[in-house]
Image (spheres, grey):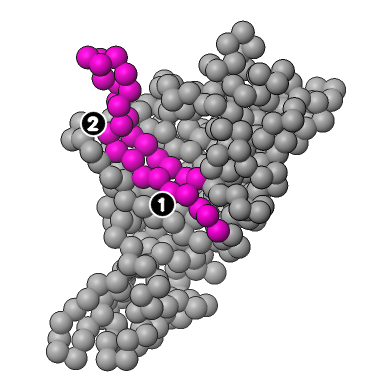
Amino acid sequence: MRNFMIAVLTVTALPVYGQALVNLDFEEWKLFKGQLLFRDYEEPTGWTSGNGVIHVAPNTDALTSKSSDASSGSYCVQMTTRNIFGQIAAGTCYTGKFEINLSDPVKSAKLGIPYTDRPAVFAGMHRYAPVNNDSATLYCVLSKWDGSAQRRVTVGEARHVVYKSVPTWTPFSFPIEYGSSDAPDTITVVFAASAGGDLMKGEVGSTLWIDAVHIGAATSVAVTPETHGAVTVVDRIMSTQVSDHAMSTVTVYALDGRRLWQEDVNGPTLYLGGIPSGPVLIEIGLQSPDGSHVCHRLMTVLP
């Protein structure tokens, strides 16, 4: 059984057919019933994890679960690293498929679902509570099968490692960098509470929460870091911190690129009323005294 656990956590990057990106807000879940000493678990529809292993590990809690502590909506996905059969088992959520294969355990987990678009951004909301010096990983990889080389090659990717605690819901947004002009045939999206989980490394108890994932339009790509301090949003009141600049036009987008609200303004502050609560991308035009304009973009969560 020890060898089986090692195989479960070393996921193989193989394409899985008949699926598409769905349930990016993690609102829909499916229940998998356990029997006797094997506990029930849930998984978000359209996503999978290593939870299937707890149906061969008695009295074991799920690695990945539904949480009502969401950034928006009713639910988010929560991943926790645990010790199962004496091995580190990172909580994960990924696009792909999990089927227990006792005769060839390496084939139990496969990453990737069919996908042919070339999205510009990998974005969403996250929280992270690491134990000791653990780190989490979030990544999106577009790939294709190279028939000539008989291997899978990367078309584009966005990768990020979270090294520190993120105690409150915080947006992430990373451009997908392309090294090829080819169209992909597969997308692999992975979230893991311990970045070294595929090597059996991590800290028991490290927990990652993910919500409101967006993979798509360029409207969500160019985010000006809030550390620039040019614009702040507190309790829906947006203010410019640059004394000689006034806001001109403000546009608010959902993370899927839909424009929710736009207003022309002329002043240092604006109340963002009438916009649904949740994560948004805000584009702010700032006008200087000489009439020139600067555009700032930031991601935030409206209460």
The residue shown at (60%, 62%) is: 167
Check the image and report above or below for 55 versus 293: above
The residues tagged by marks 1 and 2 sit, at their Cα atoms, a distance apart of 21 Å
How dense is the environment of label 1, judged by Cα within 10 Å: few (below 14), some, or many (20 and up)? many
Q: Quarter of the image holding residue 128?
A: bottom right
How dense is the environment of label 2, judged by Cα within 10 Å: few (below 14), some, or many (20 and up)? some
- As for residue 155 lying within the magenta part, the answer is yes
Residue highlighted by disc 1: 123
Q: Amino acid at mark 1?
A: Ala
Q: Percent from the top left, x then y, of residue 6?
A: 62, 24
- Residue 245 in sight here: yes
The residue shown at (52%, 55%) is: 163
Label 2 sits on a secondary structure element that is loop
Query: 110 or 44: nearer the eye?
Result: 110
Say left or right for 259 vs 61. Answer: left
The quarter of the image holding the C terminus is: bottom right
The residue shown at (23%, 38%) is: 179
Of all residues, the one furthest to the right in this rendering is 36
Label 1 sits on a secondary structure element that is strand
Q: Amino acid at mark 2?
A: Ala
The quarter of the image holding the N terminus is: top right
Q: Which mark is residue 183?
A: 2
Q: Percent from the top left, x then y, of residue 150?
A: 29, 14
Query: Total number of numbered labels?
Result: 2
The residue shown at (82%, 30%) is: 59
| Boundaries of the magenta span | 137-164
